[in-house]
Image (spheres, rainbow, N blue to C red):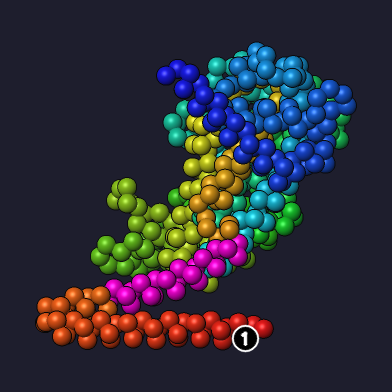
Amino acid sequence: MENTKIDSDTQANIHIESKINHFFNRFQIGTLLHRCGVRKRHGHSVRSLTEAIFSLPFTGKNFFRGIVVNEDNTFGKDAAYQMLRGTSFNWRRLLLCLGRRLFAIFNPLTNDDRESVLIIDDSTYDRSRSKWVELLSRVYDHSTGRFLKGFRMLTICWSDGVSCLPLDFSLLSSSDAKNRICENRKQLDKRCCAYQRRKEATTKATALLEPMVKRVLKTGIRAKYLLMDSWFTMPATVIALAQHINVIGMVKKSSKVYYTYDGKDLDVTAIYRRLKKRRGKAKILASTDILLKKAVPAKLVFVRDRRKKDWLVLLSTDTSLAEDEIVRIYGKRWDIEVFFKMAKQHLKLAKEIQCRDFDALIAHTSFVFMRHMFLSYQCRMETDDRSLGDLFYACCDEVRDISFMEALYRILTLVRDRAKQLGEHCEKTANALINTIIECALKCVNLSKNKVVLTTA
């Protein structure tokens, strides 16, 4: 039994390795690594190192067991650490290039009436057991209401409601030096990627939103709306982002944030009190048009909160959208929450490797994002029949013909069964009638196919 289990595990690992190898070959990840500056002057190729680290969670190993003490590897641990700590490797460009290639595959599989969106949100990068991690700081966890040691991972994803692609991220330390436990340790050239990442880590998150959206749109990735949580949906931020893409976000109930309604500057609570609410158990209570900073038009939609006797409010810069459409589209923001859970619990974010170098944290987080892209690709290819291309439409036409003939046959079978009850003479007449109808139906189908062939010719 033990030998059988070992053989099955070996076969599973071989199957996973073939899937990963196909993914690397199809999207030419080795070439992308070279274009993004991830290179080695001597020793083993960068692709072999990348593929070994990439496959760790899929084979049930962590960095120590899979890289450091694994005697089956043809390279040593120093080569892997050297690649992770590289200061000139542009991991951000690698993610965007790979995301662009996956978008080119997913976008034709998305119906025209389904909106593709960009989603921005942040999550905690927990390093509570660490002391000497570079740029480690005290960050506030909104889910628990406590401070912890680590980073804030600001992330932007593309989603069409089926597949989610994490495209870019920024590991944020605290902009306040008092909250930073460790400072920068490396002396770096200001032109390299490592210096820019460290400078970005001590910048406020709201200042990074617009550059992040512009980088994604510049690659050619298209989306109709940008979805945000209430932590980012502030008038100044929305106005800056609305220049590039329509924004839909949850609005925070704050008495310090004002919107122009009916010529007056009011907060959302005061606006809600002045609106006429819908009666009964309506999910959408009210809606109205407003102005942001007295210049940019927007629309507020007040929705009943199902968790408690309260209300929520959504903001959309696309004022032509219907109320229920705004609510429906904003529901796609949940895809990024699923991604965060997947990255932390299954793809070993912040758990697989315990590095103190900030560049290694950026590199490993990029690996986690690439793993999620790989899973999204495999799931879409194996579950979406439209990925078969022309074969899918040919099968649809064939199934449509078969289903029609089968339905006709079932109806006539019921007629024949009813005729049996009436007597032998009626049964023979019914059988003759059924055979005649089937022959005529088949002739009609053949004639229609011949007409199609002649028309296309």
User: How dense is the environment of label 1, judged by Cα within 10 Å: few (below 14), some, or many (20 and up)?
Assistant: few
- Residue at image point 82% right, 38% down: 34
Tag 1 secondary structure = helix
Q: Main secondary structure of the magenta part?
A: helix
Seen from the viewer's position, the closer of residues 242 and 223 is 223
Q: Is residue 129 visible in this depiction of the protein?
A: yes
Q: Which residue is mark 1?
A: 454
**Which quarter of the rendering shows the N terminus?**
top left
Query: Residue 103 location, x and y as percent?
Result: 65, 54
Seen from the viewer's position, the closer of residues 220 and 202 is 220
- Answer above or below: position of 52 versus 306: above
Q: Is residue 105 left or right of residue 33?
A: left
Query: Residue 452 location, x and y as percent?
Result: 57, 83
* Span of residues in magenta: 389-411
Across the whole image, how many numbered discs are drawn on residues? 1
Residue 391 within the magenta-colored segment of the rendering? yes
Specify the quadrant of the image occupied by residue 366.
top right
Q: Is residue 158 left or right of residue 4?
A: right
Query: Residue 246 location, x and y as percent?
Result: 60, 62
- Residue at image point 67% right, 83% down: 457
- Residue at image point 61% right, 39% down: 19
- Answer above or below: position of 52 versus 216: above
The type of residue carrying mark 1 is Leu
Specify the quadrant of the image occupied by residue 202.
top right
